[in-house]
Amino acid sequence: MNKEKEVRSKKRFFPWLLLGLGVILVASGFVIALQFVPSREVSRTVMIYMVGADLESKGSMATYELDGIDPTLVDSENVNVLLMAGGSKQWYNDYIDVTKTSIYQLTNNGFEAVQEQERKNMGQAQTLIDFLNYAYDNSKTDRYDLILWNHGGAIMGSEFDELYNSDGLSINEMNDALDSSSFNQNNKIETVFFGTCLNGSFEMINMFKDYANYLVASEETTLSIKNTSDLSFINEIKATDSAVDIGEKFIQTYKNKLDILKMNYEIYNQEYTVYSTYSLVDLSKIESLNSALSEFFNDVDVNDDYATIAKVRSNLYQYGSEAPFYDMIDLYNFVDQLKSLSNVKAEKVLKCIEDAVVYNFATNSKSRGISIYFPYNGATQEKAAMLSLYNTLDVPKNYASLVSNFNQLQTSKSSKRLSFLENDSTITDSDFTLALTDEQAGDFAKASYIVFRDNKDGYFLPVYRGNNVILDGNILKANIQDRQLRVVSNVDGNEYILSLIETDETDSYIEYNTMVTLEDYSSENIGDWTLDTAQMSLILDKKTNKVEIGNVSVKPNDTLPSEIAVDLKDYTNVVFASSKYHILDDHGNYTEDWESNGVIEGMEEKVDQFTFKLQNFDDGYDYYCIFRIFDVNNNAYYSKLVKMN
């Protein structure tokens, strides 16, 4: 049959008739009605629950967010914007009073107080209840959306109030607030947006399924940038937009912000992007996911499958890794890598996740839209506290039992210790290898390697920690060449070797992190000088060997996961700092406890007076290498020190 006859045949087989706005297809006795429903205008209230905390008091980030909402662009006839703001020691605008926790409405002149009230703890459920009920009672619209803006704490919740010892809203408190408000299963919020870190979790999503239709949140820590605003997506909301349309607009605004960061640092490698995530989840699909998870984990026997689970978990990307106790991993990848334990039921879980995640933005394949808690890297007491909290959450019992039983087994097995100091190591021109015994290979989970320089002053300087380690049979292998970097002064040509941690590698680039101190001595008033500890990302282009700064970020809070991207132009000096260690005892023998015996040194330069270059090993110093090895019980070991050159 030629193409023309094939088309004609299909026309004979599927006669059609237009009836008003619908189409009826008659085929082989089946009648299928497709109703084309025109989009209609709906009014909505956008409720912003903003806890400024130290993000505002130290970085004015909440004000930047609010400044992005432009009254001249917002569709005021159909979109009403209400704001409750508080929880910060200082505000960088003229309408939020730090002594009050008032409610504001967006007008043609900006935000204006519509209900002034005394200061309240925004980390308490009652404060959220009051805001939700005020919005519902005083703004009668077709739809209601809720934006929660602050720090996020994974299963610990969010909305940590700086004025009340960082008291925050736990997941259970959020549940209580929604349950006691005007919103419920019969009157749901349209979309809940989290302008926070780490709240794109199964545990948070599972709670909100009873009170909202959609949820937008990030699995990973989110990045704030001065003079940008995720909330500017409100300017783009149209009366005909669906929840999915609006959710995608929010995520697109966040993506645009990352592009701005890349342009600010003039990153030449177009493939490089800051690792970040955001997803839009259909909460009506979560009951099916709950059921599928229960079925899958019912087939998983922790005692029989402990080693398999441990190896998978140890190698999964962990969100908010700078705070290991959060222990959040991607749910899809976790289940996918455990397929061997129950393949058919695993596939059912994966399909449910795909159905639930309507839109997913992630800069690599490590994130599929929903994270989940699995205790592994946190300290013993931290895991105990997190598990105690976890047992109060509404999650499938089979999964809650799994994480609890796994933790007990890991704790009991951690006393079993191996040693790798007697294993044979070799170094060739490019590879570092270590032979393992059968027992060591069986208990092996993952490894990295560390390159040291002998400073000839009794100290060894760790210059690079790499992750490209594989286990080939019983042999650990790592490629260790052409990965170290130096910073070079443009003033006097002095060079300083950097301490680097490899964070990502593709076919085209390697990304590193290094710690720096940023200084601003531009003011004549010493009291206005600033000193910030920051993390600097460096990008090495494998083809050209050029090195550029990817981004620089500071943490406003030492315990909560959040980062503010900064511009080096806002500072006068940068200090590249490194720690060096005594790793040999008085008899010249290598000691595994070297990390407790170090000092810090550094090199200070003007922010525009340095460059980077690849480091080789022919600078007159001796270089050494070791493996850092983890077993399935998360015990860490070091191999013996081996000379490289």
Image (tube, rainbow, N blue to C red):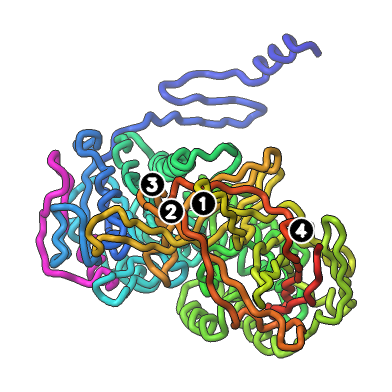
Query: What residue is disc 2 on?
Result: 223
Q: Which residues are magenta?
A: 103-132
Residue 480 got which mark?
4
| Amino acid under disc 4 | Ile
Q: CA distance from mark 3 to mark 2?
A: 19 Å
Residue 599 sits in quarter: bottom right
Residue that label 3 marks? 569
Amino acid beneath label 2: Leu
* Labels 2, 4: front one: 4
> On screen, 169 above or below 188?
below
**What residue does disc 1 label?**
276
Q: Amino acid at mark 1?
A: Ser
Asked whether the viewer can see residue 3, the reply is yes
Q: Which mark is residue 600?
A: none
Image quadrant where one finds the C terminus: bottom right
Q: Are marks 4 and 1 in contact (CB under 8 Å)?
A: no
**Residue 390 appears left or right of 124:** right
